Amino acid sequence: MTKTNSEEQILRLERRIENLTREKTAAMRALELASSLGTFDIGMGSCSEPEGVIRELTHRIGDMLDFCHSGVYLSDEETNDFSLAHTQHPESSKILEIETDALIRDHSFAWALKQSGPVFFLSANRKHQILMHVLATRSRIRGMFVGLMGRNPDEIPDTTLALLSVVFSSAAHALENCELHNRLGEINRHLESRIERRTRELQEANAQMNAIIQTVPAGIVLVDSESKNIAEINATALKMIGLTREEVVGRPCSERFCEGAQDCCPCLDGRKCNRSCDRTMRGPDGQTIHVMRSAVPVVLGGRRYLLDSFVDITEHKKLAKLREDVEQITRHDLKTPLNGIIALPDIILDRWNVEDAEARGMLRMIKEAGLRMLRMINLSHDLFKMETGKYHYTPTKMNLTPLFRSILVELEDLIHSRKVEMRILVNDKPLGNRPFILLGEELLVYSMLSNLMKNALEAAPYGSTVTLRLDDADGTTISVHNLGVVPETIRKHFFEKFTTMGKVGGSGLGTYSARLITRTMGGDIDFTTDEAEGTTVTVRLPENAPASDAKR
């Protein structure tokens, strides 16, 4: 072996040793990097801003490879545009933008986005290698790393390139975690804001509700459904009973609000008590207070309560009693002169022996009118009893035929003045002198029929026909028809008190009293009206109405 061959062999061995040393160094650096990947992922995943992740990424990549210039482009999720978010050196921005624009124009950038590993391109001046690596997760592309280096790609160990892909994948997931973290933070802040706003609104609503409850002119008591103890009470209720809140809250409600009436207490026995009950309770000085009570179940904070409210109706009771006394006095004062008017025709007939038939007829009409007026005065008291449900209804069999004659005599002037024909049909045949038997009270039936017929005559067009039909096929049906039309504005209130329109001297009590009487007799009343057919008021009475069945 010559000296020259020995030297060449030594050089080859030295180069091999150098390569092995370089590979060893690269392998050791790769192992060090691999050992820090977990810490790297945790560190980046805890970042709340993308800048922190990118800085950590460029620092780690710089430990693996030397770059003249490097930077990271991030993708905009809405526009899919890429913008330079971070560079290794401030002066690198312009160089990277020039090189990247060139790669975009020749579609190299787009091609690199589709690759899962590192790709290399020659720079525009052909002096540097450009390394590009996409930052992507399963959901979407997050960005692109671009770095210029003077090193030949073939000199980079495969282990380093593989670890580069691991680092970029971890960085992409860290960016995704960062975005998710920010979104969750934003959602959390939004929820906290909503909760804070709702809490504030609830507090304001509770304050307003408490202010309303405390100032409302009705007593309000909140009673625990299980213990029947008072949980809360407002100022009005405390004033009515003359006690303090401390003396009432926690005590059984029956001590102050159900004395002597525990079998019909809206709190203790809601099944037996009506929705609204007229009750009494003790006032501050032991006096009796009349109240209208009602209780409704409520759920507050997951616990069941009864909201018991009551209104002081003591003055209303006094006014109602005063009204009844005044009406009784008025009826008594009207009856005294009326009795004289009723008796006077008989005195004239007996004393002066009036023989003129017309004069005798007029005197009898005066007497009958007086008797009708007396019956109406008595009926006004009965209507009040019907309204309050205290009327004692005692029906008997009666013949309607004489009643119709009396009503027609009473309405004769109205019939003639309006030139209206009055027809009365029984099962579609003229009434004539045949009896029509009905179960009822004569005064009530007379008043009801008189009001309905009078209203029909007043509403009928001039020269038309008013028809009253009677049918006893199934109970008793009475219908009164005229060609007039009920105005649209009062149709919904047709049977309500004081409802009238366009009638001179009308009181609006005719249909109201007719319905009151009909329901007292156990029946019902309704009407139909339109331009073509006119108006029909129909009364339906049962065949056997129970006594004392007053209905409002």
Image (cartoon, rainbow, N blue to C red):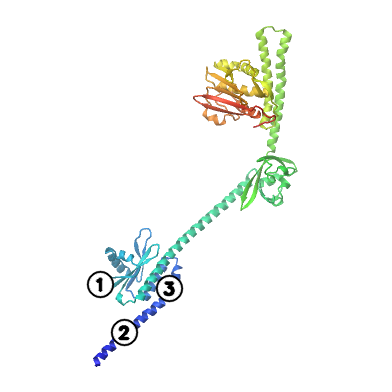
Mark 1 falls on what kind of element? loop
Residue 116: image location, x then y, percent: 35, 68
Q: How crowded is the residue under tag 1: few (<14 C-alpha within 10 Å), some, or many (20+)?
A: few
Q: CA distance from mark 2 to mark 1?
A: 29 Å
Residue 126: image tag:
1
**Residue where numbered disc 2 is placed:** 16
Residue 31: image location, x then y, percent: 40, 78
Q: Which of the two labelled residues, at mark 2 and mark 3, occupies the earlier sequence position?
A: 2
Residue at 71% from the left image edge and 45% from the top image edge: 257
Going by the numbered disc 3, the residue's amino acid type is: Leu
**Residue where numbered disc 3 is placed:** 37
Determine whether 280 is above or below 121 in the image.
above
Determine whether 297 is above or below 33 in the image.
above
**Lateral position of residue 551 relative to residue 172, left or right:** right
Mark 3 falls on what kind of element? helix
Check the image and name the residue furthest to the bottom.
Answer: 2
Residue 525: image tag:
none
Q: Which of the two labelled residues, at mark 1 and mark 3, occupies the earlier sequence position?
A: 3
Q: CA distance from mark 2 to mark 3?
A: 31 Å
Going by the numbered disc 2, the residue's amino acid type is: Arg
> In the rendered structure, are the residues bearing label 2 and label 1 in contact, judged by CB atoms less than 8 Å apart?
no
Q: How crowded is the residue under tag 3: few (<14 C-alpha within 10 Å), some, or many (20+)?
A: some
Going by the numbered disc 1, the residue's amino acid type is: Arg
Residue 550: image location, x then y, percent: 67, 31
> In the rendered structure, are the residues bearing label 1 and label 3 in contact, judged by CB atoms less than 8 Å apart?
no
Mark 2 falls on what kind of element? helix
